[in-house]
């Protein structure tokens, strides 16, 4: 067999693949050994030419995200998000396979990897062939991956039908592989696309609802409704106290800035309070430090939620606006209630006197502050059902508007 070197006639390469022949194709990472991914005979030849064990599944090259529905099922919206963000590009996404994909491609499993290569010649071949390419790297198993047509010819001249000469690959490193067939999602191979970029993309697509309002307004009721919808609930006050107990870098920074507030690695909250509540500059410094660490912890929890397949999260914070946490939110919702009702609620809830309850309520932001700074304000004076119905209408609007 004479191996053709194709530099212009991409239709020739597409036709060879449609005939069941093998053609090496360029990508932005390395050259791939392409065959008809729907033809068992072609795929078997790929295994034989490479010397690749048939227990190792192959991925399919496709021309774009629209191909997902053709070859895969039970596709999470997060997979579509990554495909739209990074395809064409060095990312292979593993999903549940449709039964129409030959078992030899899947190595007998029920999942399938899809990849859209960022090379104009190979994308053109995919469009002309109108079928997916099974295309592992164009090298004998165990040998270095080829970065140019000459490398491929050195391996397979006379053993495959053709090589598309697309020049030298720009990256020279395999694609990153992420398994999204089940949550949590897993990076199976770190390649040319960083895990951080993938997690960032998924986190940016989260719908994050910020819930705020004074004590006794009924934020807990609203949060329970979001939890029913599968939302991750993050209580910033609880997170802050957790960090005070366990975050060593934050405790070390507090020790350095507030002498006497940390003894033997343990924060003395009363000592810290004596320092900051009599010194406005010290209080500002404390808030700057703690807000920074809370922000980092919030970000990490949202990232973990995104990789776990989550799509909705809620952040509960009295200082949602002033702390800057609202910038992480898709929408902010303030829950308010009349002063007298709030006082009654916290007296019953916390077992405190009316006088102390009044002091707590009056020390917090007025309703006008929330109206000026939040996307939505909902009053919780009415009965439980009416409040829930009103809150659900707001959430539905946020979800529909994205």
Image: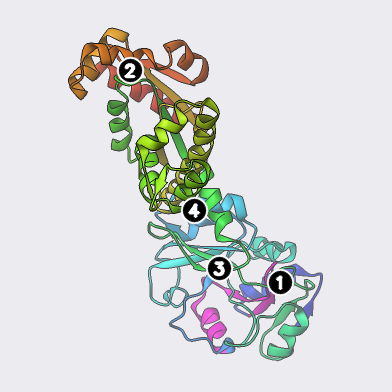
Q: Residues within 10 Å of mark 4 (few under 14, many from 20)?
A: many
Point out residue 397 in the picture as x, y percentages from the top left corner: 43, 25
Q: Are marks 3 and 1 in contact (CB under 8 Å)?
A: no
Q: Residues within 10 Å of mark 2 (few under 14, many from 20)?
A: some
- The disc placed on residue 341 is none
Q: Is residue 246 above or below residue 150?
A: above
- The disc placed on residue 190 is 3
Q: Earlier in the sequence, mark 2 or mark 3?
A: 3
Q: Is residue 234 visible?
A: no
Q: Residues within 10 Å of mark 1 (few under 14, many from 20)?
A: many
Q: Residue at x 64, y 84 (%)?
A: 139
Q: Residues within 10 Å of mark 3 (few under 14, many from 20)?
A: some
Magenta stretch bounds: 22-48
- The disc placed on residue 360 is 2
Point out residue 383 in the picture as x, y percentages from the top left corner: 22, 14
**Residue 33, magenta (yes or no):** yes
Q: Earlier in the sequence, mark 4 or mark 1?
A: 1
- The residue tagged with tag 1: helix, strand or loop? loop
Give the residue number, with chain letter if any, for mark 1.
Answer: 26
Distance of label 2 from label 3 (alpha carbons): 52 Å
Q: Nearer the viewer, residue 214 or 14?
A: 214
Distance of label 3 from label 4 (alpha carbons): 17 Å
Which label lies toward us, 3 or 1? 3
152 sits left or right of 272 in the view: right
């Amino acid at each position: 067999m004479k191996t053709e070197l194709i530099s212009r006639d991409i239709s020739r390469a597409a036709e060879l693949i449609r005939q069941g022949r093998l053609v090496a194709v360029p990508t932005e990472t390395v050259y791939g050994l392409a065959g008809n991914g729907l033809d068992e005979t072609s795929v078997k030849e790929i295994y034989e030419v490479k010397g690749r064990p048939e227990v190792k599944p192959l991925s399919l090259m496709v021309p774009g995200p629209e191909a997902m529905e053709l070859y895969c099922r039970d596709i999470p919206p997060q997979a579509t998000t990554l495909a739209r963000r990074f395809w064409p590009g060095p990312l292979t996404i593993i999903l549940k396979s449709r039964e129409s994909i030959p078992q030899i491609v899947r190595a007998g499993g029920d999942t399938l990897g899809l990849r859209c290569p960022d090379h104009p010649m190979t994308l053109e071949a995919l469009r002309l062939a109108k079928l997916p390419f099974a295309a592992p790297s164009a090298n004998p198993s165990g040998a270095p991956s080829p970065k140019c047509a000459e490398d491929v010819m050195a391996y397979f001249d006379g053993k495959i039908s053709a090589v598309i000469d697309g020049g030298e690959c720009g990256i020279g490193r395999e694609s990153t592989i992420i398994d999204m067939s089940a949550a949590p999602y897993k990076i199976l191979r770190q390649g040319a696309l960083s895990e951080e970029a993938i997690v960032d993309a998924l986190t940016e697509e989260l719908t994050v609802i910020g819930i705020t309002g004074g004590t006794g307004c009924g934020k807990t009721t609203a949060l329970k409704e979001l939890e029913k919808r599968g939302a991750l609930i993050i209580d910033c006050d609880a997170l802050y106290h957790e960090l005070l107990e366990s975050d060593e870098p934050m405790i070390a920074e507090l020790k350095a800035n507030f002498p006497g507030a940390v003894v033997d690695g343990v924060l003395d909250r009363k000592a810290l309070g004596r320092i900051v509540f009599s010194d406005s500059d010290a209080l500002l410094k404390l808030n700057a430090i703690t807000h920074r660490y809370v922000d980092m912890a919030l970000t990490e929890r949202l990232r973990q939620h995104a990789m776990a397949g989550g799509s909705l999260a809620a952040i509960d914070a009295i200082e949602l606006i002033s702390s800057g946490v609202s910038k992480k939110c898709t929408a902010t919702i303030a829950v308010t209630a009349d002063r007298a009702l709030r006082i009654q609620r916290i007296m019953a809830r916390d077992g405190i006197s009316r006088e102390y309850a009044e002091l707590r309520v009056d020390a917090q932001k007025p309703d006008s502050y929330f109206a000026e700074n939040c996307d939505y304000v909902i009053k919780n004076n009415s009965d439980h059902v009416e409040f829930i119905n009103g809150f659900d209408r707001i959430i539905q609007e946020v979800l529909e508007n994205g």
